[in-house]
Amino acid sequence: MDFTIPAEIEDLRAQIAAFVADELIPLEADRASYDDYGNIRLDLLDRCRAKARAQGLWTLQLSRDEGGRGLNRQAMAICYEAMNRSIFGPVVFNSAAPDDGNMMMLDMLGTPEQKARWLTPIADGSVRSAFAMTEPHPGGGSDPSMIRTRAERRGDVYVVTGRKWFITGAEEAAHFTLIARTSDDPRAGLTAFLFHRDQPGWRIVRRIGIMGPEEHGGHCELEFDGLEIPAENVLVGEGRGLKVTQTRLGPARLTHCMRWLGLAKRCVEVARAYAETREGFGMRLAERETVQVMLGDLAMQIEIGRLLVMKAAWELDRGGFARKEISMAKIHVANVLHKAADVAIQINGARGYSTDTPLEWIYRYARQARLVDGADEVHKMVLNRHLAEEGTDFWSWDVAEA
């Protein structure tokens, strides 16, 4: 791999970094900037989004045909990391989950008519979206073969019954992608559907309280009791739901990691700034070997995460699936984020545990990173499956043609 980046991507990264420093970081210190769930207040978000759009920093991940900048995955890694120096960053640039993954999914898989109806309003920021797959026991979670929500075809419509939960953003979403069972075929039994929140036959049962700050729209439990979805709103085709989930979730896991690296670096930034000035027992914290070891280890672990993310991005950009690479990145970066927040709080002491810094926000948020889009243990099982199939070739290098 060549780790040099194009000059235009560096210029874009620098522009994003300046926007974050000037427009977003100052907002974090003002408690009036937050909504009741610990995220940026919606009216303030609208103003920040207008500024980002005016500077050409809007939906960079989408193709140019859909109003984006057509960034490949490697360029996204560079830009997303810069965005998430601020806890408010990704949503301001319309690059936050779940809209980010939903837009890329629709951009790749939607028909022109579906893109116009379902993608464009998300891309221009007029609506939010959600991806409804996870179900309460005994339904499907990390194992989509367990999905029990059913969609029965009746003429030109599908009638949906079932239940979903922990659906991110559902309370604010207008456009939904729903994964439901249309047959018992183990490979072709799932289908992806598009529906609007105003359609009858479904409801939000509750917004599930969580430990950390929440995305706009929270994490909700949904019930489907006769929702009718026209056949024209099937994405890709009946029985192709597994393809949709794979297209949606693989890159989305990686973009999570891109953003988390930005948060991890912010933790180190806050810790270093405090250690440089805080004195005790005759010396600054930064002069203590224990603190130096803590920060040096974090710097190394973050850089390992960046390399894992970039290798996965490179593999996707050249047309691969990057399943191993994404799983390794997801495990490592999720744990690094949690460790970075924990170490930074420890160095800052009581200040880190307070709301005077973003560290306690990041710490609460970080714990979910080891669960969302597949728990650590699931990804380790995936890696072991590759190891069993490939043996020592698990670590092989691709060889260029002579």
Image: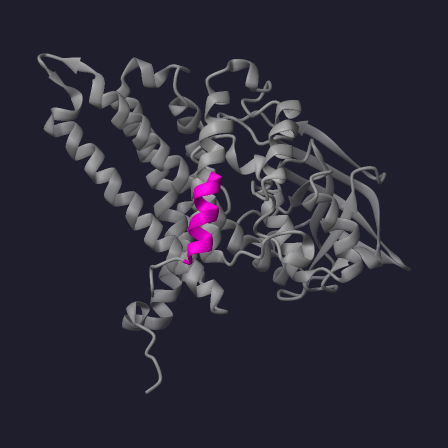
Question: Is residue 11 found left or right of 280 in the rendered image?
Answer: right
Query: Quadrant of residue 214 in the image?
Result: top right
Q: Does residue 13 show up?
A: yes
Asked if residue 179 lies in the magenta stretch, the reply is no
User: Magenta residues?
Assistant: 6-16
Q: Is residue 133 above or below residue 35?
A: below
Residue pushed farthest bottom? 402
Q: Main secondary structure of the magenta part?
A: helix
Residue 103 vertical placement versus 221 (above, below): below
Q: Residue furthest right?
A: 155
Residue 365 lies, in percent from the top left, at 46, 30
Please tell me whether residue 9 belongs to the stretch shown in magenta. Answer: yes
Whether residue 380 is visible to the viewer of this picture, yes or no, is no
- The quarter of the image holding the C terminus is bottom left
Direction from residue 213 to residue 232 in the image, left or right = right
Q: Is residue 315 above or below residue 123?
A: below
Residue found 42% across the figure and 28% down from its top: 362
